[in-house]
Amino acid sequence: MRPDRLRKPGPRTKDTGPPRTGADEKATLLGFLDQLRNAVADKAADVPEPQVRTGGTPSGTSLLGLVKHLACVERFHFLGERVDDWGRTMRPSPEETVDSVLADYREAVERANQVVDACPDLMLPVPRPPRRGPAPTMRWVLVHMIEETGRHAGHADILREQIDGSTGR
């Protein structure tokens, strides 16, 4: 670690775990996913410029980039929106702010949750434009999104700790 990155550890926020109850499988899966979504958004909230968009890894991954990427992933899997360049989804433009990227992510999550709520059977395919092969089931997409969001929540934990030393969810 570079000397300019050494910081006194910041405060640890209280961890809030996933829900312990669920009326059914869909509610349980969505509860875990929502907990991870909130963890990612909380990591980027209130981080000042330019730290929120500064890459903390050799690949250039930043907190703001992670949130922007996850908004695109939500729209791709739940809403069927096409993504032409996944690499670009990790790079916020200079015009995008923490507030605008977080608002976009929250809007994508809200729309995705509406699609999930409207699905009467997790074995049904998710909506998507025509592509090769069958559409995945809603169950598969929910499990995949828990994995994808959880992976990036871990990245966000590390990036946030590098910025100001804070740990926890």
Image: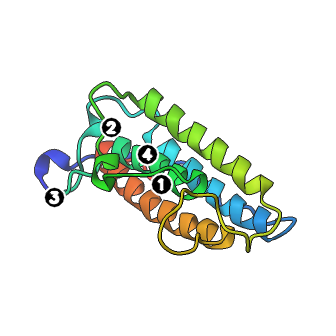
Please state the total of marks drawn on the protein image: 4
| Dot 4 crowding, Cα within 10 Å, few <14, some 14–19, many 20+ | many
In contact (CB < 8 Å): disc 3 and disc 2: no
Which residue is most to the top?
95
Residue 144 in the image: above or below residue 11: below
Residue 9 can be seen, yes or no:
no
- What amino acid is labelled 1 in the image? Val
| Crowdedness near tag 2: few (<14), some (14–19) or many (≥20) residues, C-alpha within 10 Å | many
Query: Which circle, 3 or 2, is nearer the viewer?
Result: 2
Residue under label 2, please give it.
52
Q: Residue furthest left?
A: 3
What separation in Å lies between label 3 and label 2 (alpha carbons)? 19 Å
Mark found first going from the N terminus, 3 or 4: 3
- Residues at marks 2 and 1, CA–CA distance in whole angstroms: 20 Å
Residue under label 4 = 67
For the N terminus, the quadrant is bottom left
Residue 81 shows in this picture: yes
Q: Which mark is residue 73?
A: 1
In the image, what residue occupies the spot 61% across and 46% down? Answer: 109
Measured as percent of width and height from the top left, residue 126 is found at 64, 62
| Residue 1 marker | 3
Q: Percent x, y for residue 93?
A: 29, 33
Q: Which kind of residue does numbered mark 4 sit on?
A: Val
Cα–Cα gap, marks 1 and 4: 10 Å
Q: Marks 1 and 4: CB-CB under 8 Å?
A: no
Q: State the SS at label 4.
A: helix
Q: Upstream in the sequence, badge 3 or badge 2?
A: 3
Dot 2: element: helix
- What amino acid type is highlighted by mark number 3? Met
> How far is disc 4 from disc 2 in space, using C-alphas?
10 Å
Query: Residue 48 vs residue 24: left or right?
Result: left
Rounded to the nearest angstrom, the CA distance separating label 3 from label 4 is 25 Å
